[in-house]
Image: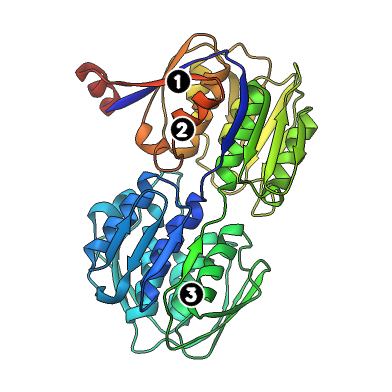
Amino acid sequence: MQKLMIEGGHPLHGSIHISGAKNSAVALIPAAVLADSVVSIENLPTISDVETLASLLEDIGGSVSYDGSKMDIDPSSIVPTPLPNGRVKSLRASYYMMGAMLGKFKQAVIGLPGGCNLGPRPIDQHIKGFEALGAKVTNEQGAIYLHAERLTGARIYLDVVSVGATINIMLAAVKAEGRTTIENAAKEPEIIDVATILSSMGAKIKGVGTDIIRIDGVEQLNGCVHSIIPDRIEAGTYMIASAAMGREVMMNNVIPDHLESLMAKLREMGVSIETADEQVRIATPSEITSVDIKTLVYPGFATDLQQPVTALLTRAGGTSVVTDTIYNARFRHVDELNRMGADVKVEGRSAIINGRSSLQGAKVKASDLRAGAALVVAGLMAEGVTEITGLEHIDRGYEDLEEKLLDLGARVWREELTSSEIQQVKSS
C-alpha cells in the first residue's frame, strides 16, 4: 500500500492534457458486449476502473487487447456467464453489464455493484426499466438475476433523473423489438457519448441530450471505432486546483461547454477564465471571494466537483454554503479538511465553510474518489506536507495524477506505507 505525499505552497503554472472521460469509459466498455464484431475504443484513461472492466469482459469470454489508451474488444465469444461477486464488488459501474448482457443474451446474473460508499444509491430505476422491457428481475443471495423470453419496446418514465438508469435502459433497449421511449432521461455528455458509440454500431437512437430519448430496436449491432470525450470532472478538478494555487494554467483537450456551471462559479469567486475550442486557461487573483453552490443534475453544478470545490472555498474570504442535492453522504471529506485546519461544519445536506483558513499538512484518508481529489486540492494549499492514504479510490478516476501535478510545478510523490501505518489505515 502507498500514500501520496504533497508539499503544499508551490504555485501551479504550465499546461496539462485532460484524459478521456472516466464516466464514459465505464459505460462504453460494457456497451461493446452488444456488438457482433470488434469494437475499438480510443482515448481511454489509464485508471483502475478501466482495467477492472477489461478483466470482467475476459471473465465472460471476451477477447480484450488493451495498451493503456486504446482497447480492442472482440465480443464474439462472450457467453452470459454469471458475474456474482469478485471484481464486480469493487466497481459500481459494473451494473452496466446488466443492461448490456440483458440486451445481448436476454439474461444476466450480476453481483450488486460496489464502488465508492456515498450512501444509499438504489438501482430501482434500472430494474423498473428492465421490467418494462419484459425482463423478470430477482435478487438472490446478493446478486441480481435478469431473464426475458423477449424484450419489447416500452414507454419508461424515470421517477428521478438518473445517469446510470438512462444508460442501462439504453443498453437493454437497442436490440429490443419496437420503440422504447425514456422520459425524464438524464442529459449528461457521457450519455451522448454512449449513444454515439451505439449509433456507430448501428443502433437507432434519437433525442439524446434532451429529457426524452427514443430508441428503435435493431436485430444486429456491428463493431466500430470510437474515441471517448474528454473528462469534464478531471478537467474541473484541475481547474479547481488551479484556482487554489495557480498562477496561469492551460488545460488542453477540454470541451468548455461541459463545464459552464463550474466556470460560472469560479468567475463569481474572481478567477479569470478564458476558453478556446478545446482549451481552458485559468489565472487566479491573490484573493478569491465566497460563493454558495448547489449541486444539480446536468447542466447544473456536478456533484462530482462538490468535494474539490469545498476544499477550494476554505481559502475564500467570507462564508460559503455548499449543498449537495444528489448524494446525502458526500461530506466524508469534511472531517479530514478540518483535521488540516479548515473550519467546515455539515448541517443536513449542506457544508458551511468559513474561509481564510490556514491549512496545515496532516495525515488524512480518502474515503472515496472525489474526497481524495478534495484532499489533493487541500494538500496543494496547505503549509507543510500532507500524507493521503486510500489511494485506491483516487486511482479509480485520475490518470497520471502525480505526473500532471509535477508538470504544473507541484511537489508530489508516493511512498510505501510501513506495516504499522497499514494497520492504522485498516483500523480507521
Q: Horizontal and vertical percent for residue 141? A: 23, 62
Q: What is the distance, in whole Å, between disc 3 and disc 2 at their CAs?
A: 37 Å
Q: What is the distance, in whole Å, between disc 1 and disc 3 at their CAs?
A: 45 Å
Q: How many marks?
A: 3
Give the mark, 1 or 3, whose residue is nearer the N terminus. 3
Residue placed under numbered mark 3 in the picture: 129
Figure check: 249 above or below 317: below
Side (left or right) of 206 relative to 96: right
Amino acid found under the numbered disc labelled 1 = Val
Residue depicted at x 46% and y 44%: 118
Neighbours of disc 1 within 10 Å: few (<14), some (14-19), many (20+): many
Kindly indicate whether the residue at mark 2 contacts the one at mark 3 (C-beta within 8 angstroms): no
List the single residue furthest toward the left: 419
Neighbours of disc 2 within 10 Å: few (<14), some (14-19), many (20+): some
Disc number lying in front (1 or 3): 1
Q: Quadrant of residue 28?
A: bottom left
Residue depicted at x 48% and y 87%: 218
Q: Horizontal and vertical percent for residue 404? A: 50, 31
Q: Horizontal and vertical percent for residue 390? A: 36, 31
Side (left or right) of 76 relative to 376: left
- In front: 112, or 371? 371
The local secondary structure at tag 3 comes to helix
Kindly indicate whether the residue at mark 3 contacts the one at mark 1 (C-beta within 8 angstroms): no
Residue depicted at x 60% and y 47%: 232
Give the mark, 1 or 2, whose residue is nearer the N terminus. 2
Q: Horizontal and vertical percent for residue 15? A: 61, 32
Figure check: 346 above or below 62: above
